[in-house]
């Protein structure tokens, strides 16, 4: 089965929101995969897990330093999809671009505050099974990574049961911005959640070739323009790595 001519949905943060600019990994990914259609809903500053006060409005925008706005989370990007695709949604408004997807990428996590409460590997099972019973979907805690990932997966899988859903681990960055051990821990947590769900693809973009020790804080380095976001070279590494992973899915 060919990996080309697929309909692709991208969700995520600023690294994916760079889209098809020269510093956007989606550009180099698309050059290889050649999608027939793609929709990119990624937003600068987006977090994988929710804040405590999130109320989904289908408008996950970036408001810079406005900390009073808590809607910029991937689950709210999913809400945007629900409103465009799910006729049972009370705010449904049909959008033909959301009719069908073959591949869905969720690339986020670098902006999440690293706390044991949000990112507890030992507590993953609590978002799937409690006291020997499967935890109902509506009771998952999207404030945690496992809960948010389950929510994202189950809603997208319900709408697009034939799509391959992919979670991409965060890339490395300079130590002063994103300590290596915290990113590695997030990577391992995401891999473990994907193992439980099973019906998802874990793309280990953490190992795409970008290494934090070769980057500079606030300056252009080998692969990152400021120690966090990719320059052209970094974008090519991410795009080509993710494209190779997709090719493997269709062997």
Image (cartoon, rainbow, N blue to C red):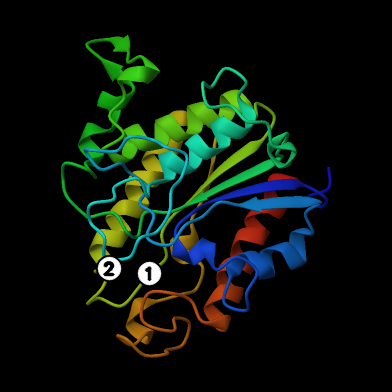
Q: Specify which label sits upstream in the sequence, 1 or 2.
A: 1
Do tag 1 and tag 2 residues touch (Cβ < 8 Å)? Answer: yes
Position of residue 243 measured from the top left corner of the image (x, y, whole percent): 67, 60
Measuring from the top left, give residue 175's x and y in whole percent.
25, 76
Q: How many marks?
A: 2
User: Which residue is drawn at the image coordinates 70% and 39% (left, top)?
Assistant: 101
- Mark 2 — residue? 180
Q: Which is more toward the observer, 118 or 128?
A: 118
Q: Is residue 19 visible?
A: yes
Examine the image and state in which quarter residue 26 appears. bottom right
Q: Residue 199: image x %, image y %?
A: 55, 31
Q: Looking at the image, which residue is at 22% across and 43% down?
A: 118
Q: Is residue 4 left or right of residue 163?
A: right
Q: Is residue 76 above or below residue 170?
A: above
SS for callout 1: loop
Residue 46 lies, with reference to residue 84, above or below; the image says below
Residue 179 relative to residue 173: left or right? left
Image quarter where the N terminus lies is top right
Image quadrant where residue 212 sits:
bottom left
């Amino acid at each position: 089965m060919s990996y080309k001519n697929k309909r692709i949905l991208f969700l995520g943060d600023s690294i994916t929101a760079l889209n098809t600019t020269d510093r956007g990994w989606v550009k180099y990914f698309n050059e290889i995969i050649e999608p027939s259609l793609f929709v990119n809903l990624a937003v600068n500053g987006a977090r994988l897990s929710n804040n405590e006060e999130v109320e989904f409005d289908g408008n996950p925008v970036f408001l810079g330093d406005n900390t009073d706005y808590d809607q910029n989370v991937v689950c709210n990007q999913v809400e945007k999809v629900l409103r465009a695709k799910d006729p049972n949604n009370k705010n449904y408004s049909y959008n033909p671009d959301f009719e069908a997807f073959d591949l869905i990428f969720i690339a986020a996590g670098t902006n999440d505050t690293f706390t044991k409460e949000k990112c507890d590997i030992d507590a993953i099972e609590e978002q799937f099974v409690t006291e020997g019973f499967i935890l109902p979907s509506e009771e998952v805690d999207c404030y945690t990574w496992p809960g948010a990932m389950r929510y994202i997966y189950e809603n997208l899988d319900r709408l697009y049961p034939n799509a391959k859903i992919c979670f991409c681990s965060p890339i490395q960055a300079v130590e002063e911005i994103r300590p290596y051990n915290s990113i590695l821990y997030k990577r391992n947590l995401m891999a473990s959640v994907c193992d439980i769900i099973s019906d998802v693809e874990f793309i280990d973009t953490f190992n795409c070739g970008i290494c934090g020790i070769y980057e500079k804080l606030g300056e252009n380095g080998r692969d990152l323009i400021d120690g966090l976001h990719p320059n052209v070279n970094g974008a090519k590494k991410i795009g080509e790595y993710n494209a190779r992973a997709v090719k493997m899915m269709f062997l």
